[in-house]
Image: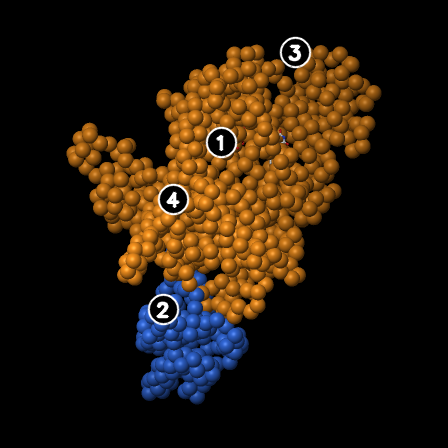
Amino acid sequence: MTNESQANIEKSIEKIIYQAALALDDHNWDGWFELCDTDFSYSIMSFSPEINKNMTYFSGNKKELKGLMDMLPKHNTDHSPLHRHTSVYTVDVADDGKTADAVSSVTIYQNMLDGINSHIDSGESRLFVIGKYIDKFKITDGTPKFISRETKIDNRRLDKGSHWPL
Amino acid sequence: METNIQTPGKGAYTGSSKNALDASERLNKQIFIEEQKSIFKNIWVPVCHESELPEPYDFRTSSIGNDNVLICRAPDGKINALLNVCPHRAMLIERRPRGSFLEGQASGNPKRITCMFHAWQFDMRGNCVYVAREKEGYQDRFCKDDAGLRRLRCSVNFGGFVWVNMNDQPVATLEEWVGDAFLSLEGHINSTPLEVVHYRKEFIDTGLKARLLKMSDSVGAHSKQSLFNFGHFMTEDSKPGADTNEKKNSFPTPNAMQSIRVNLFPGFSFHLDGPTLNVSTVTPVNGNRLMIEHKSLAPQGERETERNTRSQFYNANFGPFRAMEQHETKAEKQNEEKKQALANHLLHEWSRWMDEHPDGESRLSELATRRSKNAILDKDEDLIGPKVVVIGASHAGIAFADRLRKNGFTGKIAVFDRQVGGPMERPPLSKGFLLGGGETVESKSLLRQKKWYKTNKVRLNTQTSVQAIDTERKTVTVNNGDMVNYDMLVIACGAIPRELPATVGMGNSFTLRQPADANAIRQAANNADSVIIIGGGYIGLEVAASLRKKGIAVTVIEAASRILARVASQPLADHLVQLHRDNGVTVLTDIGVDKINKEDGRFDSVILSNGEKIKADMLITGIGVFPDSKLASDAGIETQRADGGAILVDDMMRTSDGDVYAIGDVAIRRDQALAVESVHNAQETASIAAAAITKTDAPTIQTPWFWSDQYDTKLQSVGIVPVQDEEVYQVVRPSKRDHGISFWSYKGSELVAVEVVNDPATYMEARQCLDTNRSPDPNQISSLSYSPIDSGGGRSQ
Ligand SMILES: Cc1cc2nc3c(=O)[nH]c(=O)nc-3n(C[C@H](O)[C@H](O)[C@H](O)COP(=O)(O)OP(=O)(O)OC[C@H]3O[C@@H](n4cnc5c(N)ncnc54)[C@H](O)[C@@H]3O)c2cc1C
Ligand code: FES
């Protein structure tokens, strides 16, 4: 792989991570799924120093996620929009240029829509979650697609609410 | 959502709306303070789970109301709860949520709790062990022995949770407090060691009382609802297709389907749903805010696939990212009557604590009554005479108390035991008990019924472990820090089963001594197809027979050249090996265990000394016991060796301290060669000690006897089979009874022991011979027409 093609792949990986953030912010699930390979799997993990363990809070493959998204209208959800601020920290492309790993920082704010008393609470933004995206990609003809995303969150204070992918 | 609660009589409306707001805020604050003081200072709070501090010196911090609590594991494995506040200048000592004191910290020594402010140090029991500049700074005005962290009442129970009560004299013991609320849950959650696998917090903007009300809203629709004393309740849902009597449908299997929820006042919920145990606890933060901590527990060291199944169920039903179904028609289905009953139940309890009960019922005055009653109790009724304290309420301790009263003793008798529940017989634990299907200990195995203690004025204190003996001040210290004085002390601490180091802390690996061990084995056996038993002694063989009867494949591994090498004759051992083999047990002798493998923390297989690997679902170790004499040796009472062994006693069971006696498995006479661990020995030594204390005639000494049941075979043995040498031999005597036989052991021409299989009449004859020093002719005893009793045969001296 030439330096130039490596740099191109790195660029397109950064781009796809930002595209994913936008699609997720916009609840554009189909747009998000398009960025993901058929074998895509997703998880939300967190480490608890209280119990000294890694915890899995969510895990599913593309099909399960799709099923979940289709059910969304039937669920009670906190409808407050989320705003993901992402910075890509590292991108490591494999020597053969066919796969890559990336680690990004993510800070998610919640813009209150229906708090305890929406009359008072709505409109306010608050910090929702901080963490990292640990992503793996498959690269076909220079185009990356997500094959997995682990959202590793630092929060252990998690109130029930949104259950769509972070 | 309800936030402010108007409680009659508190917080009056004062006119302007500004004042009204202030008033309700003040009211919330006042209620919050009152709840902290009246409720949280008095109730039992599950602060963490024992698995969160698995190793000695591990700790966890928590808070109850405004009090900071430190929970740590002492080097002896016991969990203690301490106030996390330094007695020096009242600074918070430990700030991390969890960790270990084993390694030194920047500002502290290893194995010490160190206050970072002025470096005072404490041990895991809260004793102060170092005061900076003690001599220079304080001369003799102050000494570290006077300063210690406050020990809190702490108990580990109900599925391994650690419960703490801020009140040293609570309104009820933990067991009384919980009452029957845990009955339907206990069997499931006690069946296997658990660990916490999910933890998170949630804050909700509401007060405690409002949440209690909300609780009754959400559970009204359940099929079964039971209300218990102290404001606890239980709900049980039946799910289609789930028969929770079936083990495949109930926790801990990963496809369990039951749903049982126990809620202890004022909001500690234990919800066994499907394969998950979900526990949530409440901590008020201020008058209008509660912190709810959610934990999910799973069996320790289970396979990854099983863990994943549970995790998925948890995430779908309890996790913060779960999908919440719209409330279909549930609300309509709720049973208004049940809902109302639950709401009343919870609110009445709340008002009882807050002194606002409509009928004036008050928990706080109950507390006061109990306290004054306790004070009277300590003076102990109208009993006059010396006070005898007994440590250990098992065969020896209880037989002793019984004998003492029968001998006319009129003083006080207090018996302490660390076990939960009424003292039980040990022999059934390896026999019929393992066959039972129930989840609790059967009352027929109790050593004495409850009434006996009352009638005989024997004050039994269970779940109370004696932690120190002071022979000079003549006191014992029990686990809540209380000191009890004695005139005479009887140590009946029994013995502790030996463990193989590799099996310590291993899931699905057991030893058997106490009722709780037997319960755990019984539960695990329900889910096992195969078991390995290391050790071919009586306990190992009895367990083998019981589990075989349950259809489990059993392998017994004995390192010696034969089973029962220490306690039975060769012919009897051969007879029993055949019996076990006929019943399908694999008995391996003369072979060691080189390695014990675990997988995911659970027992997996053993590697034998010949390299063979045997896998099984569970492991039981029965390789003997050692006397539980540490308490005594720590107090300077003489034991066999400086580092332990049995407590040495004289013929009257008196130890090296004239006011301290030792009986049962923990004691050995100075001239006694071999320890005999048996019920007979426990009873006999108890009678001797009782006679010595009451200065009555010593009981007639019987020849030691013992029994064992394996399959439908009853073995009875009398006398002690001597170590095999040239002079020792056995003669086989046939029996008139089906499957009966007996083995008569002689040393020269002297009869020393008889082992009888399925023939009680012959056993009685043998016993009579040995009790009266008769030695029937060894050349004739094999003939049935020869009577060992009528034959004369006075023992050759
Ligand atoms: C499974 C099993 C089957 C048996 N079968 C037979 C049989 O068939 N026939 C027979 O003759 N014998 C049998 N035995 C042996 C017999 O049960 C024991 O010899 C007998 O129990 C000894 O009684 P003990 O009171 O000396 O000690 P233990 O029974 O060991 O009791 C000691 C008690 O002291 C308590 N204790 C210890 N330290 C403290 C402390 N610091 N504070 C508070 N409490 C403390 C313990 O909790 C325990 O309850 C069997 C034993 C077991 C375990
Ligand atoms: S405050 Fe703890 S040592 Fe001074």
- Measured in 3D between alpha carbons, the distance from the residue under mark 2 to the one under mark 3, in whole angstroms, is 89 Å
Amino acid type, mark 2? Val
Q: Closest to the observer: B150 or B136?
A: B150
Q: Closest to the observer: B768 or B596?
A: B768
Between marks 2 and 3 in the image, the one whose residue lies nearer the viewer: 2
Label 3 SS:
loop
> Badge 2 is on which residue?
A129
Q: Same chain for labels 3 and 4? Say yes or no.
A: yes
Query: Which corner quadrant of the image does residue B687 belong to?
Result: top right
Task: Indicate whether B560 appears above or below B376.
Answer: below
Q: Residues within 10 Å of mark 4 (few under 14, many from 20)?
A: some
Q: Position of residue A73 (x, y in %)?
A: 50, 77
Q: Are marks 2 and 4 in contact (CB under 8 Å)?
A: no
Q: Which chain does the numbered disc 4 sit on?
A: B
Q: Are marks 2 and 3 in contact (CB under 8 Å)?
A: no
Query: Which corner quadrant of the image does residue B131 belong to?
Result: top left
Q: Which chain does the numbered disc 1 sit on?
A: B
Q: Residue at x 66, y 56 (%)?
A: B243
Q: Which chain does the numbered disc 2 sit on?
A: A
- Measured in 3D between alpha carbons, the distance from the residue under mark 3 to the one under mark 1, in whole angstroms, is 49 Å
Amino acid type, mark 3? Gln
> Badge 4 is on which residue?
B38
Q: Residues within 10 Å of mark 1 (few under 14, many from 20)?
A: some
> Badge 1 is on which residue?
B461
